[in-house]
Amino acid sequence: MLSYYFDLAIRSIKRTPFISALMIAALAAGVGMTVTMLSVYMQLSHDPAQSLSKQPYALQLQSHPASQGGSYGGAMRQLTYMDANAIQRQRNDGATVVMFKSSFAAISPNTEIDPQFVEGRVTTRDFFELFEPEFISGNVWSEQVDLEADFVAVITESLARSLYPGQEAVGQSITLNISEYRVIGVIKDFAPQPKYYDLNNSAFDNGESVFVPFSLTPIAEISNSGNTNGWRAEVINSYEDFINSEYHWIQVWKAFDSPSQRESFDRWMRGYIDEQREAGRFPNPDASYFLRTSEEWLEINGVVVDESRILVMISALFLVVCIINTIGLLLGKFLKSAPAIGTRRALGASQWQIFLQHIVEVSIIGFAGGLAGLVMASLVLSGLDRILSSGMGVSHLMLTQLHWSMWLWAPAIAIVSSVAAGLLPAWRICRMPPSLYLKIQ
Amino acid sequence: MQIIPTLNTLRRNPSTTILLMLQAILTIAIVANLSALIVDRINDINIDSGINEEGLIVLDMYHFAEDFNGEMTLNRDIESLTQLPSISHVSATNQVPFSGSGSSGAYSIQPTSSDETTYVNAATYRADHYLAETLGLNISHGRSFTAEEVMTFDEAAEQASIPAVISGPLAEEAFGRINVVGEVMYMPETGDVPIEIIGVAETFMSPWPKWRGMSENSIWFARKPSNSNFKTLAIRTEGISYAEAQRLISETIYTNDRSRVIVGFENYEQMRDRQFDIDHALLFSLSLIIVLLIGVISLGSVGMAVFNVERRTKQIGTRRALGASKRSIVSLFCLESGVLLGVSLVLAVPVAMLLNVQLMNMISIDSMSVVYPLGVGLALIVVSLIGILYPALKASLVPPSVATRTL
């Protein structure tokens, strides 16, 4: 039966090629725009940490006076060096990542290769355990290095290739600014999008290409190239002044293996806060700390921009107009074929069969519209990619890639829209009294 | 008049009438709001930086020498670059308007030792005395700096007062007027040492065009380059291509000192555009939706009108047989369409305003003027009436004999 309706539907679509094309185009436009905007929204709200084996928590410490801002869920986005270092030294309860972004001139021992500017991350060993970049060769530094600094570095595949063309990188030396480091590990290029572990400068960038131990910070006097925020005036004359200041510039992440570990850490943190408050360092009597899941962290940092929400809403409204437009066209088309339907009814077709026949026709149009919508979505996304990726300077911008779930969403939206568009016209035509049209014949 | 039969026709086809009206109402509401949003963002993108953008190049460098002396190195750069015939001015600065990153601070009109001090936020420019002429900044009141006033932070803190040039909006926010030459301000970093305002630039934007309360506020101190790794030069070029400028400048920079890497070399327009990439993406998306919407609606309406005429062939024939002229058939269709769209427009205005309220909850925009839905609605009526002409003219050609054929 359905194959007969399918045949009838194809004939009917061919009979009015202009109107059929118009309906498919209208649905394609509506579905295409909706899918595009939904895809961008999904990419923005994507949490890359979801695929990690441990849930990482961003740590915030509310150490400044309550009156001094704290626009990231009631606290500042980063910590002071003093506090971060204390948490790093405690290190008993679970994984501890303490880090900041820095820039370096990376110089190869091969003097024919020009020095190049690279972004680097100054961090602890646990960064690799928690955020899981993939090692190609070598390994991360030992736990000992987090306590007693050593000039070692982990670099990415691309940096290794450009500094040591055709050679094994592990064991080579790399000069970062004026200090010489030993390369002990090479990882695959690492740039999760959004860059949940450091949202200071942009949620979308190329990531860092060199990683060095946090314990080197005061020794190599490594400068911060991320954000530095302060809440009081401080005169900084030396690097020592800087790391002993109340400036907030360090990111801290924690992960726990068990609830008891988390409790133990909580006890220690409370003790630490009390101690610092009594020493007069934390002016806020309600000083406290927060652990945010990666999902909460993305939310607090406003990674999903307002523009994206607006566009999802507007494209959905646009889809509604496209559906209304299609209803009008279907109504016109179906009612025009009323005499033929009258004959079919008179020959014994039931109302339900007539209804079904028209819904099949509408679904075919919806399916074609959905396919065309997917094609359109990828075109619009590549347009957006051209606009955004040059500005953001990101080589492979996930934001403008079609989100995998759109392969399900696009046909679903298209079929639902087309059936919604077809319901009223199909109902109207199946309710037509056959006698009226037979008379005219 | 034909108004009664027109209303009857519309009443007798309720589903078609309601569909057409819904479509028109939503179209007017959406297009009006999107247009208002587009105009708003275009104004944002075209915001005046207060400087002469053409021919300006922004160069970012990263120095890695152990004994790096910022003052010496940059003075040598400025000297050798300005000797090139195509370069007129060069300034060493920490930031330029719309550079997207830089420093800012809190400033006050009372000494900062008091507890009741209230602060105004402003972008803090630390640059040499060449900044104004290099950027093409217009100092509307007072003067710019002299070479003798360029100091290090420590030297400045020891003076009786620290000279500064500020932007008009900062003057307005702190003092309530623009011409504040000779007035003093304070900053926490130097306590009670007064900042003496020697000049005001009416427009002098901060590095952040989107930072509310900060975007237009700037203060400029005459500072010698520090020894920090990152250094920025603003370079004013004349009559030279971008590629040629890049070649000449990099050559000069690397000849002067090889222990550095050029991190960024950009036309000012290029750099400025980067601050508005989300706006460009939004404009692209919104314009595309408007174009598609208008396309879908106009083609769809013509399609429906054609059906309408075909379905009413017999009725038209009867009218013609009863003596209606071709002109009156055309005007019948136009009237029907006009009444329908007129009612839709009246209903569309409140719907558009409701949608606007919804948008205002989601994004920071000003409330939309009622001119937008009215303008869009009137345009839609004009376009639709032109669009209806073809099917209406086709209808007027229906011969009166049709009426007699099938009855």
Image (tube, helix red, strand yellow):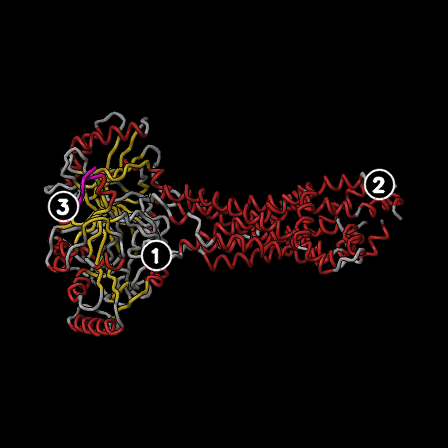
Mark carried by residue A171: 3
Are tags 1 and 2 found on a single chain? no
Label 2 belongs to which residue?
Answer: B325
Q: SS at mark 1?
A: helix
Query: Dots 2 and 3: beta carbons under 8 Å?
Result: no
Mark carried by residue A66: none
Q: Quadrant of residue A279?
A: bottom left
Residue at 35% in and 34% down: B54
Q: Quadrant of residue A66?
A: bottom left
Q: Position of residue A416 (x, y in %)?
A: 58, 57
Q: Magenta segment range?
A: A162-171
Magenta span has A163?
Answer: yes
Magenta span has B180?
Answer: no
Q: Chain of mark 3?
A: A
Marks 1 and 3, how far apart at CA: 32 Å
- Which quadrant does the N terminus of chain A fall into? bottom right
Q: Foreground residue, A88 or B242? A: A88
What crowding class fits label 2: few (fewer than 14 Cα within 10 Å), some (14-19), or many (20 or more)? few
Q: Chain of mark 1?
A: A
**Mark toward the start of the polypeptide (1 vs 3):** 1
Question: Marks 1 and 2: which is nearer the front?
Answer: 1
What crowding class fits label 3: few (fewer than 14 Cα within 10 Å), some (14-19), or many (20 or more)? few
Q: Chain of mark 2?
A: B
Question: Marks 2 and 3: which is nearer the front?
Answer: 3
Q: Foreground residue, A253 or B99? A: A253
Q: Position of residue B159 (x, y in %)?
A: 14, 49
Give the amino acid type for the residue marked by disc 1 in the picture: Pro
Give the amino acid type for the residue marked by disc 2 in the picture: Ser
Query: Dots 1 and 2: beta carbons under 8 Å?
Result: no
Marks 2 and 3, how far apart at CA: 96 Å
What crowding class fits label 1: few (fewer than 14 Cα within 10 Å), some (14-19), or many (20 or more)? some
Q: Position of residue A320 (x, y in %)?
A: 58, 54
